[in-house]
């Protein structure tokens, strides 16, 4: 007898057939099929769960085979399938064909929740499986697909114990269907995080806010740099409040990835953070700068999605970006270009989705004070950290005293900035230098804070809908992903705009990738203005957001 199961692997998984054979011999359980530690230990958990649930464990030799046998299996999600396969072989329970089961067993017989339930049901439905038994705490996750049109005909039972799983099988034999109705409330969309904040709470920084609006509308990558206290992180963390909701297909794909990743740290579900509703808000991931390359890119002994994949259709925010390891920053280049990440493994290449937008925030220098006070009339290249020029004369002091200026040498500043590398920076379409707001801006009343997130979000939503209509059935999701070969067709310009672009390219000496990046950003600016033709003003704004970022000293020249 056999029961179907599922093993997560990367951004997907494999359907496993759990086969059980009982024969005469010394009582015991043998497991074949490249079972790893947690799966081998299932022998003792299953035996104890049988006894503590009131069932008699067969006193014969039991062979469990996990097919396909050539792929490694790990994790405790195979406990319940193994137990039900043994029951079917011993004629203790009627197990129907093509039933997919997931669940970890405690010694008491209680069924614990597992990761990947939504992904397992989606994979099972693709294979023609329509019946599922899942842990009770994963019931909301299983109901997500059942509540969508694609889940018509799918039936599942959410069980809390081994005894309940057996009762569900007998119920199905008598009634022709598994017990339990789909909890429709579980399929509701997840609301916007309450801690997203509002743009109106932040005083000043009009250029930075506009750049975030463009990034949210077109899916563009962005770098913001400046001294501490300028509002870089505060505004970046408010980006989710203006982003457009995911489409139904995008929401299912994102929710499936989070299902494979395991419990959410923020506890989005009632069962210790397990998913219980469709994720319709674009993900916003902000890993600490100590994160490893494996944590960012994904992988591991049993491969799991990393932060890049968890930011799929959303934002990966790297605060204090130069503090990340250089190999981590440089590993972002290929995913930004290909929108997928390939990991080579002994079992074969593993492909993880990575269609995300990158948001980098950084100080302009290691000490962070470069740009706190601007000054003029000096040659920054001839000045040392003590404020003296090459000829020994005293350079112009800071407005509030020399001790409040940057304490880093030019070599230290450039070494710090070189961690980005030219190849990564060339893929960043929006670069925004910021300085702390003026005192009069900070002291404004609440009503003078500027536009609210709701107002900006409406403009972003309208621009996103324009792109969805434009790119329907093309495989392109946002303006940031327009292929170079389609740039001329999808980004028509007026004659004046073409002239302005040629002048900007000649003056700034930009690369071919920068040329395409400017056109993509200009396309988004035009969409925000509801204009099909890219005009001069759209080109100029796109160039303005591209011209900074190559030199950290540019923060000193900012007058506002």
Image (cartoon, rainbow, N blue to C red):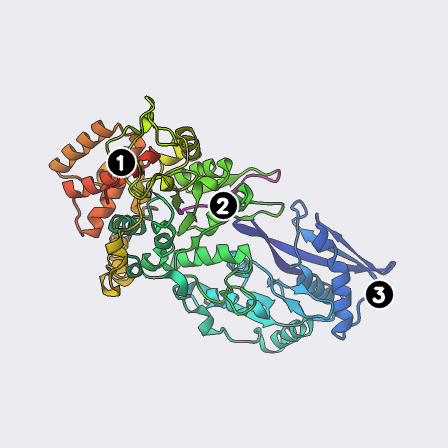
Which quadrant holds the N terminus? bottom right
Picture disc at residue 59: 3
Picture disc at residue 172: none
Q: Which of the two labelled residues, at mark 1 and mark 3, occupies the earlier sequence position?
A: 3
The residue tagged 1 is 547
Q: CA distance from mark 1 to mark 3?
A: 76 Å
Q: Position of residue 456 (x, y in %)?
A: 26, 58
Which quadrant holds the C terminus? top left
Q: Is residue 486 at least partly visible in the picture?
A: no
State the extent of the magenta-drawn residues as a range.
346-358
Q: Is residue 240 at least partly visible in the picture?
A: yes
325 vs 154: above or below: above
Q: Do the CB atoms of the residues marked 2 and 1 lie less than 8 Å apart?
A: no
Q: Residues within 10 Å of mark 2 (few under 14, many from 20)?
A: some
Q: Quadrant of residue 412?
A: top left
Outermost right residue? 26
Outermost top residue? 391
Q: CA distance from mark 2 to mark 3?
A: 55 Å
Of badges 1 and 3, the one in the foreground is 1
Q: Quadrant of residue 180?
A: bottom right
Q: Secondary structure at mark 3?
A: loop
Q: Which of the two labelled residues, at mark 2 and mark 1, occupies the earlier sequence position?
A: 2
Residue at 70 percent across and 50 percent down: it is: 36
Residue at 56 percent across and 51 percent down: it is: 13
Q: Residues within 10 Å of mark 1 (few under 14, many from 20)?
A: some
276 vs 516: above or below: below
Q: Is residue 451 magenta?
A: no
Q: Secondary structure at mark 1?
A: loop
Residue at 54 percent across and 55 percent down: it is: 260
Q: Position of residue 248 (x, y in %)?
A: 38, 60
């Amino acid at each position: 007898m056999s029961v179907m199961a599922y093993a997560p692997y990367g951004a997907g998984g494999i359907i496993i057939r759990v086969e059980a054979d009982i024969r005469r011999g010394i009582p015991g359980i043998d497991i074949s099929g490249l079972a790893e530690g947690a799966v081998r230990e299932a022998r003792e958990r299953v035996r104890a769960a049988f006894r503590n649930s009131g069932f008699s464990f067969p006193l014969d030799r039991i062979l469990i085979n996990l097919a396909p046998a050539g792929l490694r299996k790990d994790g405790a999600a195979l406990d319940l399938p193994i137990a039900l396969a043994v029951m079917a072989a011993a004629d203790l329970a009627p197990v129907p064909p093509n039933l997919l089961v997931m669940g970890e067993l405690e010694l008491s017989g209680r069924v614990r929740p597992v990761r990947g339930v939504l992904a397992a049901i989606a994979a099972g439905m693709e294979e023609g499986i329509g019946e599922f038994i899942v842990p009770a705490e994963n019931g909301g996750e299983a109901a997500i697909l059942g509540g969508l049109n694609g889940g018509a005909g799918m039936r599942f039972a959410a069980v809390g114990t081994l005894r309940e799983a057996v009762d569900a099988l007998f119920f199905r034999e008598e009634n022709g269907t598994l017990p339990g109705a789909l909890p429709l409330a579980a399929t509701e969309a997840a609301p916007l995080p309450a801690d997203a904040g509002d743009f109106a709470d932040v005083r000043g920084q009009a250029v930075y806010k506009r750049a975030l609006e463009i990034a949210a509308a077109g899916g563009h990558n962005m770098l913001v740099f400046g001294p501490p206290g300028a509002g870089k992180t505060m505004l970046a963390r408010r980006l989710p409040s203006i982003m457009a909701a995911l489409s139904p297909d995008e929401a299912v794909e994102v929710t499936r990835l989070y299902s494979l990743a395991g419990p959410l740290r923020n506890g989005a579900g009632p069962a210790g953070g397990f998913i219980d509703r469709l994720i319709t808000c674009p993900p916003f991931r902000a890993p600490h700068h100590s994160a490893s390359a494996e944590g960012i890119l994904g992988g591991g002994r049993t491969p799991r999605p990393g932060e890049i994949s968890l930011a799929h259709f959303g934002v990966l925010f790297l605060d204090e970006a130069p503090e990340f390891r250089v190999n981590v920053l440089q590993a972002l280049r290929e995913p930004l270009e290909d929108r997928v990440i390939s990991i080579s493994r002994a079992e074969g290449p593993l492909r993880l989705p990575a269609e995300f937008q990158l948001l980098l925030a950084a100080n302009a220098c290691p000490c962070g004070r470069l740009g706190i006070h601007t000054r003029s009339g000096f040659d920054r290249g001839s000045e040392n950290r003590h404020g003296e020029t090459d000829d020994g004369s005293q350079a112009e002091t800071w407005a509030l005293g020399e001790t409040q200026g940057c304490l880093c040498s030019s070599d230290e500043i450039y070494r710090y900035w070189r961690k980005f590398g030219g190849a990564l920076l060339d893929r960043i379409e929006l670069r925004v230098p910021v300085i702390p707001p003026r005192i009069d801006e900070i002291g404004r009343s609440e009503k003078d804070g500027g536009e609210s997130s709701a107002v900006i979000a409406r403009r972003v939503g309208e621009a996103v809908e324009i792109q969805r209509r434009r790119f329907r059935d093309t495989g392109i999701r946002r303006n940031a992903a327009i292929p170079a070969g389609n740039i001329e067709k999808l980004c028509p310009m007026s004659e004046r705009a073409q002239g302005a672009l040629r002048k900007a390219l000649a003056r700034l000496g930009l690369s071919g990738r920068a040329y395409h990046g400017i056109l993509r950003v200009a396309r988004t600016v035009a969409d925000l203005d509801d204009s099909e033709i890219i005009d001069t003003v759209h080109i100029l704004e796109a160039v303005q957001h591209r011209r900074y970022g190559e030199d950290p000293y540019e923060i000193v020249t900012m007058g506002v």
